[in-house]
Structures are given as C-alpha cells and as structure tokens.
Image: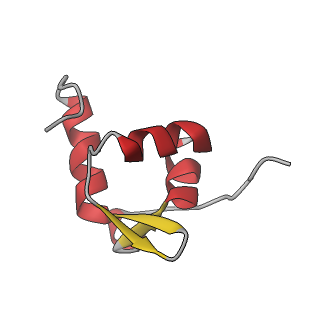
C-alpha cells in the first residue's frame, strides 16, 4: 500500500529544521521513488539517521526557490 502521509503546513516556521524523505513526498506531492532520485543527485546535503534520510529546511527551500527562478535546480 502506498504511503499516504498528510502534512498540513501553514507557514515556513512550522516546518521542522530537518525534513525526512517521507515528509518531502507529502509536502511536494512527489513519488517516493522520485524523491530518492533527487536525493541521489546531490542537489542538497543530506543527514542520515539510521535508515532515514533528512534534508535541512533551508537547503530544501533554497532549492525550491532556485526552481522558481528558472534554474535547473543545481544552485
């Protein structure tokens, strides 16, 4: 069964400082496979805790802003 995690974010301040791959899937509406693909592309530094992979909030938001600016995501 597919992961159907739901996250309700009202503001940037509500995001945790480390965002896990499952949270990225829910926040961005991407498939888990695609999120893992993005993480392997070294677009942002990751933090590993056990088997979980996390991205710092600042890095993820910067990457999203770079996409808005028409860049290819490699800031």
Q: Position of residue 47 (x, y in %)?
A: 35, 69
Q: Position of residue 2 (x, y in %)?
A: 79, 47
Q: Quadrant of residue 64?
A: top left
Q: Residue at x 19, y 22 (%)?
A: 70
62 sits to left or right of 32: left
- In front of the other: 57 or 13: 57
Q: Residue at x 59, y 39 (%)?
A: 33
Q: Is residue 55 visible?
A: yes
Q: How is the image coloured?
A: secondary structure
Indicate whether 49 appears above or below 12: below
Residue at the far right in the pictured view: 1
Q: Position of residue 19 (x, y in %)?
A: 43, 65
Q: Position of residue 25 (x, y in %)?
A: 56, 49
Quadrant containing the C terminus in the rendered view: top left
Numbered marks: total: 0
Q: Quadrant of residue 43?
A: top left
- In front of the other: 66 or 12: 66
Q: Quadrant of residue 45?
A: bottom left
- In front of the other: 12 or 67: 67
Indicate whether 74 appears above or below 23: above
Q: Residue at x 25, y 32 (%)?
A: 67
- In front of the other: 26 or 8: 26
Q: Is residue 30 visible?
A: no
Q: Residue at x 60, y 44 (%)?
A: 32
22 sits to left or right of 75: right
Indicate whether 13 appears above or below 69: below
């Amino acid at each position: 069964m597919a992961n159907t995690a739901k996250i309700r974010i009202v503001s940037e301040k509500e995001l945790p400082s480390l965002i896990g791959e499952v949270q990225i899937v829910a926040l961005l509406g991407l498939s888990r496979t695609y999120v893992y693909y993005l993480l392997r592309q070294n677009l942002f530094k990751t933090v590993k805790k056990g088997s979980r992979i996390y991205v710092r909030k600042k890095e993820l938001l910067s990457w999203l802003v770079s996409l808005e600016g028409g860049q290819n995501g490699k800031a």
